[in-house]
Image (cartoon, rainbow, N blue to C red):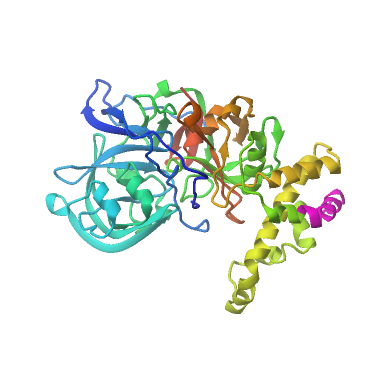
């Protein structure tokens, strides 16, 4: 959802595949993938996530192996991109796409994309070559975190594994922005989110699969293989789930808001220590199109401190601690609610008005606030982080001296403005586990599971799997559970019953 930028240069090992289709006795279409190594200096952004505005239970009978479940093998690009192949048109034109639960449109480059360099590096749809093409022509645009695309709608048949979706509305992209799309290992994106966030209100591919009775169950499931050296990148199954890729029962939680696959999180722990940030509940989006785990800066900074990640020194953070630390301590120990502390000391003057209002500001008010809002917002954010950190330490009866020593250390670990943080590869073994609480169950990530590593020896580069993302109320605080989480926990998306299930991947 939010923009990201890698701290330093990440040299990724690319995997290029040739695709072969084969049938199997269990009624599942299997696509075998071959891969070879590409130049180790190939550099990409570690994540392609939706960049739209932040404003903007029981057992499922698994039908895997039945005639109405179809499997799409996925390709793993160094744990940063997972993608598979679809066909559009008659005869079929093949495209490599990311299957993205964080968006809802299908788009591929158009043969009419003349002025974007990235289009020339990828397969392009030629409507004149398809006998099933239907002209639409309505213009549209989508903004992503790492760039934007624009183009126009068309209709044609779309083949996913053995399933042929007829008269699917999709976008022919005629402009693709930024270097990211040039370097990406995919041609386009197939959104698996809800129609509520579909640009142009286009009916998503998954909806048409269900409507056209191509699947017998309204579920699809992801298994993401986190071993970048493995022949299998992962599997996406429409209409079922493969028991060989998970163990135990899935823990299901309801979708709390249609659009994204949004659920509720409980407390977040570093080691055995509660951060206290999501005790009252945080929203989370389960997003196969985001490589990393995105969360509030307040918590990501605590994670950075625990794992020794290198952040950017925040002068504003230190300024708040130096000038207002004593007052913050007094207010918290006096029982003032944490969300009121910063407004009482005058650093978050507009918080109450923003939270109480309906989101509409008068033009005059906007103009008066414009010049000073940036600086005030930075100090306000620094204060709010300091309050959360102080409160978490107070709960375990730390002294004032130890609390502010800890907060000053955290100030040095505030993530870079665009999110990612580098870490020392040699320290992975000593890092703590981190845990999410979902449906009253704890889901643990070990250091080797939340650290992205490429290269060996002196050439090794390690990046924290956590990035900062701050979404204000009422939509936030918000987490995005991307591939770092989904690679550890097999995920079932149940659109019929509006719930998401997680089980340990194998």
Looking at the image, which residue sits at the far front?
A: 458
Residue at the extreme bottom of the image, as rendered: 364
Residue at point 49% right, 45% down?
6
Front residue of 313 and 51: 313
Magenta stretch: dominant SS? helix
Q: In the image shown, does 485 or 456 lie closer to the viewer?
A: 456
Task: Judge by depth and name the residue closer to the eye, 183 or 123.
Answer: 183
Tell me where residue 191 appears, x and y as whole percent.
Answer: 37, 47
User: Is residue 441 in view from this perspective?
Assistant: no
Residue 292 place in picture, x, y as percent? 50, 40
> Looking at the image, can residue 105 be seen?
yes
Q: Residue at x 75, y 58 (%)?
A: 342
Query: On screen, 154 above or below 268?
Result: below
Instruction: Based on the picture, tell me whether residue 331 belongs to the magenta stretch.
Output: yes
- Left or right of 272: which side holds 464? left
**Front residue (pair 113, 247):** 113
In percent of width and height, residue 48 lies at 42, 46
Magenta-colored span: 321-336
Give the answer, above or below, for where 52 lies relative to 11: below
């Amino acid at each position: 959802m939010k923009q990201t930028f890698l701290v330093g240069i990440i040299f990724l090992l690319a995997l290029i595949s040739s695709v072969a289709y084969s049938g199997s006795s269990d009624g599942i279409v299997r696509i075998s993938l071959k891969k070879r190594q590409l130049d180790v200096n190939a550099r990409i952004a570690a994540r392609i996530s939706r960049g739209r505005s932040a404003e903007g239970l029981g057992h499922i009978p698994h039908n895997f192996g039945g005639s109405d479940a179809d499997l799409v093998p996925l390709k793993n690009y160094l744990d940063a991109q997972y993608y598979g192949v679809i066909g559009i048109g008659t005869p079929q034109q093949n495209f490599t796409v990311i299957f993205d639960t964080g968006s809802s449109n299908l788009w591929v480059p158009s043969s009419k994309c003349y002025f974007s360099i990235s289009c020339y590096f990828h397969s392009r749809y030629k409507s004149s070559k398809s006998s099933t093409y239907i002209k639409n022509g309505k213009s549209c645009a989508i903004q992503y975190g790492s760039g934007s695309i624009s183009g126009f709608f068309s209709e044609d048949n779309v083949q996913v594994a053995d399933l042929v979706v007829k008269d699917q509305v999709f976008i022919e992209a005629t402009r693709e922005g930024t270097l990211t799309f040039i370097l990406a290992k995919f041609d386009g994106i197939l959104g698996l989110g809800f129609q509520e966030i579909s640009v142009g209100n286009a009916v998503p591919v998954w909806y048409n699969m269900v409507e056209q009775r191509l699947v017998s169950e309204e579920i699809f499931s992801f298994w993401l293989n986190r071993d970048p050296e493995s022949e299998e990148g992962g599997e996406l199954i429409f209409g079922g789930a493969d028991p060989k890729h998970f163990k135990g029962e899935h823990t299901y939680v309801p979708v709390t808001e249609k659009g994204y696959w949004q659920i509720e999180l409980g407390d977040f722990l570093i080691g055995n220590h509660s951060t206290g940030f999501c005790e009252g509940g945080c929203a989370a989006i389960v997003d196969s199109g985001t490589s990393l785990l995105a969360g509030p800066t307040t918590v990501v900074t605590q994670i950075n401190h625990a794992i020794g990640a290198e952040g950017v020194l925040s002068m504003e953070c230190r300024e708040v601690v130096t000038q207002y630390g004593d007052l913050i301590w007094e207010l918290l120990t006096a029982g003032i609610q944490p969300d009121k502390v910063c407004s009482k000391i005058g650093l978050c003057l507009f918080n109450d008005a923003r939270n109480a209002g309906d989101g509409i500001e008068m033009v005059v008010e906007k103009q008066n606030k414009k010049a000073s809002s940036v600086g005030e917002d930075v100090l306000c954010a620094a204060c709010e982080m300091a309050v959360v950190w102080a409160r978490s330490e107070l709960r375990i009866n730390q002294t004032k001296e130890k609390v502010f020593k800890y907060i000053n250390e955290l100030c040095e670990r505030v993530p870079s403005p665009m999110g990612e943080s580098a870490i020392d590869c040699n320290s992975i073994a000593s890092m703590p586990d981190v845990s999410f609480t979902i449906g009253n169950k704890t889901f643990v990530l070990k250091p080797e599971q939340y650290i992205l590593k490429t290269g060996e020896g002196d050439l090794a580069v390690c990046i924290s799997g956590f990035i900062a993302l701050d979404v204000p109320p009422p939509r936030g605080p918000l987490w995005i559970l991307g591939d770092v989480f989904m690679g550890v926990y097999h995920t079932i998306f149940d659109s019929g019953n509006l719930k998401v299930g997680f089980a340990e991947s194998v």
